[in-house]
Amino acid sequence: MSFYGIFETAGSAMTAQTIRLNTISSNLANADSVSGDPEEVYKPLKPIFSAVYNQFNALQTREQGLVPIRIADVVEVASMMEGRYEPKNPLANEEGYVYYSGINVVNEMADMISATRSFEANVEVLGNVKSMQQSLMGLWRS
């Protein structure tokens, strides 16, 4: 009996959630960023998750349920940016517009809670596997 697949899957999920938390913290830190140029304003980051199916071990993947997760990419979401007419703002461009990142702090906090819960669930999986391994070792000692 091998527990390697469980460790790989849970570990890859924990790594993915860590990257997700990193992007959330960047978004929260830059939530109030302002610029006079729409190209220079901070754009929120979102990770793109991807399941990794090993084509050489497709049968093993189906039978054992081993599908690790990877981060395919981290993309900028420019559509959330908003321009406001504020001609007295020192950062305003020639037309009087200031551009904001458009980050919704409430959504980011909810996403952070979700990422934290996912990370904790995978830590729990690893704890259960460790307990199972210790039980198996106890059988050998008896």
Image (cartoon, helix red, strand yellow):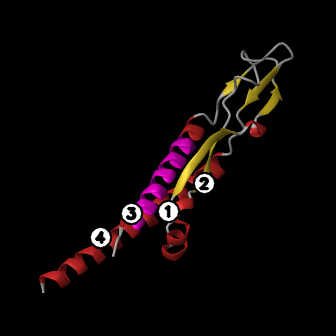
SS at mark 2 in the image: strand
Q: What's the distance in space between the residues labelled 3 and 1, CA to CA?
A: 18 Å
x 78%, y 39%: residue: 79
**Left or right for 138, reference 118:** left
Tell me where residue 80 appears, x and y as whole percent. 75, 40
Judging by the rendered image, the residue that carries numbered circle 3 is: 7
The residue that mark 2 highlights is 50
How busy is the neighbourhood of tag 3: few (under 14 within 10 Å), some, or many (20 plus)?
some
N-terminal label among 2 and 4: 2
Q: Is residue 97 above or below residue 28?
A: above
Does 98 sit above or below residue 1?
Answer: above
Q: Residue 122: which quarter of the image? A: bottom left
Badge 4 density bin: few <14, some 14–19, many ≥20, Cα 10 Å: some
Label 4 amino acid? Lys
Quadrant (top left/top right/bottom left/bottom right) for the N terminus: bottom left
Q: CB atoms at circles 2 and 3 under 8 Å apart? A: no
The answer to whether mark 4 and mark 1 are in CB contact below 8 A is no
**Three-letter code, disc 1:** Arg
Which of the numbered marks, if any, corresponds to residue 117? 1
Q: Which residues are magenta?
A: 5-25
Q: Which residue is mark 4?
A: 130
Disc nearer the start of the sequence (2/3): 3
**Mark 3 belongs to which amino acid?**
Phe
Q: Secondary structure at mark 4?
A: helix
Looking at the picture, which amino acid does disc 2 mark?
Ser
Answer above or below: position of 103 versus 3. Answer: above
